[in-house]
Image (cartoon, grey):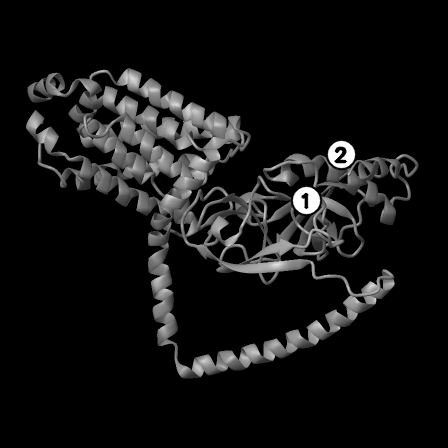
Amino acid sequence: MTLREQQRISVLLVAATSLAALLLMLAPLPLWLSLLRPPLLVLVVLYWSTMSPATGGIFIGFFCGLLLDVLQGAQLGQHALALSLVTYLAVRLHLIMRAKPIFEQSLLVLVALLLYELVLWAIDGWSGHPLNTVLRWLPPFTGAAVWPVIAGLLGRTHAPR
Amino acid sequence: MAFVGRSRHQTPSRDSAPGPRFVLFAVLSVVCLYYDQRDSWLQSLRYWMQGSLYPLQWLVDAPRVGLEQIGDALESRDSLRAEVARLQQRNAEVDVNALRLEALEHENAQLRALTQALPALVTRHLAAEVISVELNPLKQRLMLNKGKRDGAFQGQAVVDARGLLGQLTRVGPQASELILLTDPEHAVPVQIARNGLRSIAVGAGNSGELLLPYLPVNSDVKAGDLLITSGLGGVFPAGYPVATVTGIKRDPVLLLTQVRAKPLATLERDRETLLLWFDPTHSAAPVAPVASDTLPQVTLGAPVDAADSEATADDPVGVDSGEGEMPAAPATKAGKR
């Protein structure tokens, strides 16, 4: 991707796709589906952070994390910290990530999502609201599973590489 | 690969060093986490954010509301007539019950040697609808469409037509978060309606049940017993129906009775809920514990009430356990209140 193409990914596009992902995170679903719901917002932010670290990146991660904190009634700063960490790694490793075929990307995404959940879990415990159930470790796996779809859809929104 | 390599050199300098920015935002997050645990200026930031994000929640909920309104508009005349007839009959039944209740209240007042009937316990109530937005599916929380602007406050009791639902935790300008009875972080001081035995009902999580973990092995509990609020803990008034006992397991090793109970309120499908305001001078109004702001029963009520429940357990069945020392305990507890 050349610099010119990279600049074509506007902040507006990143904001619009993130907002759509956020709305999908809020949409009510039956409980069993809701337990499997992939963390779409994290995936979208991850995608933009690897594709265009200049427009995506840690600030977007932090900001989206704060929105999640408020909307999901979590500790303020919980998702913000987790998402900042994940986007930091994405920005650091974006060249490695981009060079990988899509299924290897999925594996890296799985690691990132597990790390994300680990941070949330740790903060849940430290802040005195422990939530120790196997169920909370499911979304990282469904998230990694839908990564190819998300990456494919978002890939269509900007100029091809 | 050559292209990719070049793009790194040409990107603006701010993302060539993501480390310092990450440290900045990580520190910011930790500061937020630290102050969110305490009551502080951050609460007003959160309140403001809740208010400005409400349109998103409204948007997510809008399709359901729209569908419901279309459904209402298409409902046929006959079905509406049938519903009116059904509601009229129900109203007549309720009226009869209310007559009886009035008589009972009068009698109660006389028994208490009061000159006039007690004032109403609930001074004000407000219907609140559940907004269909997803919070954390692992927690038992709901969003209600009433907030501070409608007078809602943190720790307010919420009921539905059948029983107690829970209390408000985070109150925004237009909407607030309801923590259900069945959330593992929620505990409600209850008593068995049949014999007045007091205990704590803790939420059991996704199973939609309540657990009573602090009852001694010889307590007088039966399946089908009705649990009502005991009025301790400072949030819920006394006498509201909470749950019915469904299962009992007596553990002779731990000397405890594990009791499971099913809440009377319909937790999942509830659309209409009621926020309640109480007359603080009423005798059944919640007794406020020592000054505390967040979820008083969980932090303060539990240990105190657990001691109470052990003590009251002696009244009905305590023939063999040490009666000599037990009654002394609640007296000191009560004295402190």
- Percent position (x, y) of residue B86? 55, 79
- Percent position (x, y) of residue B283? 76, 53
The image quarter containing residue B21 is: top left
**On the rendered structure, is B5 left or right of B67?**
left
Q: Where B293 falls versus B279 (above or below)?
A: above
Q: Nearer the viewer, residue B90 or B121?
A: B121
Q: Where B122 falls versus B14 (above or below)?
A: below
Q: Residue at x 69, y 72 (%)?
A: B98
Q: Chain of mark 1?
A: B
Seen as rendered, the residue at the extreme right is: B324
Note whether residue A103 is visible.
no
Q: Quadrant of the C terminus of chain B?
A: top right
Q: Residue at x 21, y 32 (%)?
A: A48
Q: Chain of mark 2?
A: B
Q: Amino acid at mark 2?
A: Val
Q: Amino acid at mark 1?
A: Gly
- Percent position (x, y) of residue B144? 47, 53
Residue picked out by circle 1: B234
Mark drawn on residue B253: 2
Mark drawn on residue B129: none
Note whether residue A16 is visible.
yes
| Dot placed on the residue nearer the N-terminal end, 1 or 2 | 1
Q: Nearer the viewer, residue B309 or B248?
A: B309
- Percent position (x, y) of residue B48? 41, 40
Q: Where A89 falls versus B276 (above or below)?
A: above
- Which secondary structure lies at badge 1? loop
Q: Where B34 falls versus A38 (above or below)?
A: above
**On the rendered structure, is B168 left or right of A39?**
right
Q: Residue at x 50, y 36 (%)?
A: A133
Disc 1 packing (10 Å; few <14; some 14–19; many ≥20):
many
**On the rendered structure, is B20 left or right of A8?**
right
